[in-house]
């Protein structure tokens, strides 16, 4: 066994001591942050600020709305997509991200391809197509998280109603107990009711901000109960059971369709991977025909055919429930 230099042992122990000391400082200084800051965005803003109306206006403006809750863009579909994606900063941040991506794409294509036409097309794609795709992805992810938490939110409302609380207080309890996105969204509902909106309008505004598939059932149940009366707690309890069953069914279908999705991914990645492998192993394999326009047209047609096949497979393994 080789001898170990005691100096290295001392260095190692000193490094371990420094790491443990830094961890102790972190646990003492940062792990004691308030519960309000850890739950959701609205409670973090309310920490140290008692003016709920200012917080409501700030949350609306972060989502691309006016202070009164109106849409800011004349393009309603884009504005609603931006709103439901949950992107903080609204249209200003989206435009800055799109311009930065366009500049980066333009410079990269100019350096790699030395073509102003291709660089301009890439920049236009980053400005027009890429933001919409990113927002749709963010919206789908946010709606998925909302759907996973929604049944728990309804259960909290049901327990609160059975304890004798009115609906606005029950909504406030959801905003206090659950994380984002449900916590902040129901907090906005509670604040809108506090500052003059009726319950039905606040609930419809919630659906406009989220757009999740299960929300219309909840909004309709609350609206009917507000106009005709009835046992809202029992209605929402049944609704919670339905939503949980739908959520389980979605997960089951996702598991059954996972094989088809993986096959589509592998079949799509295989020709691309083989193309790059051949380019690395034998650069002259395509070199003799790369200069002909027919080669580029053939590769473009193959890429278009592959995209068409992927879209068909995507439609086959995705079901609406």
Image (tube, rainbow, N blue to C red):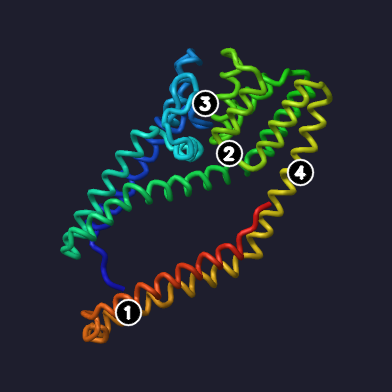
Q: Nearer the viewer, mark 4 or mark 3?
A: 4
The quadrant of the image that shows the N terminus is: bottom left
Q: Residues within 10 Å of mark 1 (few under 14, many from 20)?
A: few
User: Residue 178 versus residue 64: which sits nearer the camera?
Assistant: 64
Q: Position of residue 188 (x, y in %)?
A: 55, 24
Q: Secondary structure at mark 2?
A: loop
50 sits left or right of 225 in the view: left
Q: Earlier in the sequence, mark 3 or mark 1?
A: 3
Which residue is found at the position 66% from the left and 33% from the top?
153
Task: Reply above or below: 170 against 10.
Answer: above
Quarter of the image holding residue 87? top left
Q: Nearer the viewer, mark 1 or mark 2?
A: 2
Q: Which residue is mark 2?
A: 211
Q: Earlier in the sequence, mark 2 or mark 4?
A: 2
Task: Reply above or below: 252 against 98.
Answer: below
Q: Secondary structure at mark 1?
A: helix
Task: Reply above or below: 283 against 78.
Answer: below
Q: Position of residue 217 (x, y in %)?
A: 71, 37
Q: Earlier in the sequence, mark 1 or mark 2?
A: 2
Q: Position of residue 116 (x, y in %)?
A: 18, 58
Q: Secondary structure at mark 3?
A: helix
- Residue 242, numbered label: 4
Q: Nearer the viewer, mark 3 or mark 1?
A: 1
Q: Which residue is mark 3?
A: 36
- Residue 277, numbered label: 1
Q: Nearer the viewer, mark 2 or mark 4?
A: 2
Which residue is found at the position 19% from the left and 54% from the top?
107
| Cα gap from disc 3 to disc 2, whole angstroms | 26 Å
């Amino acid at each position: 066994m080789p001898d170990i230099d005691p100096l290295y042992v001392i260095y190692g122990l000193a490094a371990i001591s420094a790491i443990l000391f830094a961890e102790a400082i972190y646990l003492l200084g940062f792990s004691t942050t308030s519960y309000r800051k850890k739950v959701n965005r609205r409670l973090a803003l309310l920490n140290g600020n008692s003016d709920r109306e200012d917080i409501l206006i700030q949350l609306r403006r972060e989502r691309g709305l006016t202070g009164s809750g109106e849409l800011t863009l004349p393009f309603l579909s884009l504005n609603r997509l931006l709103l439901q994606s949950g992107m903080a900063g609204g249209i200003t941040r989206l435009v800055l991200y799109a311009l930065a991506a366009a500049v980066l794409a333009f410079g990269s294509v100019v350096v790699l391809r030395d073509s102003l036409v291709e660089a301009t097309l890439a920049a236009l794609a980053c400005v027009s197509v890429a933001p919409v795709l990113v927002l749709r992805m963010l919206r789908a992810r946010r709606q998925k998280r909302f759907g996973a938490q929604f049944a728990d939110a309804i259960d909290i409302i049901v327990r609160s109603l059975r304890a004798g609380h009115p609906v606005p207080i029950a909504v406030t309890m959801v905003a206090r107990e659950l994380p984002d996105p449900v916590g902040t969204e129901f907090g906005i509902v509670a604040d809108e009711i506090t500052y003059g909106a009726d319950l039905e309008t606040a609930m419809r505004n919630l659906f406009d901000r989220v757009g999740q598939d299960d929300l219309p059932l909840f909004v309709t149940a609350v609206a009917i109960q507000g106009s005709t009366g009835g046992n809202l707690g029992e209605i929402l309890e049944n609704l919670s059971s339905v939503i949980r069953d739908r959520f389980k069914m979605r997960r089951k279908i996702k598991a059954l369709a996972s094989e088809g999705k993986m096959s589509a991914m592998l079949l799509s990645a295989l020709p691309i991977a083989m193309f790059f492998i051949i380019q690395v192993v034998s650069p002259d394999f395509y070199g003799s025909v790369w200069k002909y326009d027919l080669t580029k047209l053939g590769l473009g047609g193959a890429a278009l055919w592959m995209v068409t096949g992927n879209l068909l497979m995507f439609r086959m393994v995705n079901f609406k429930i």
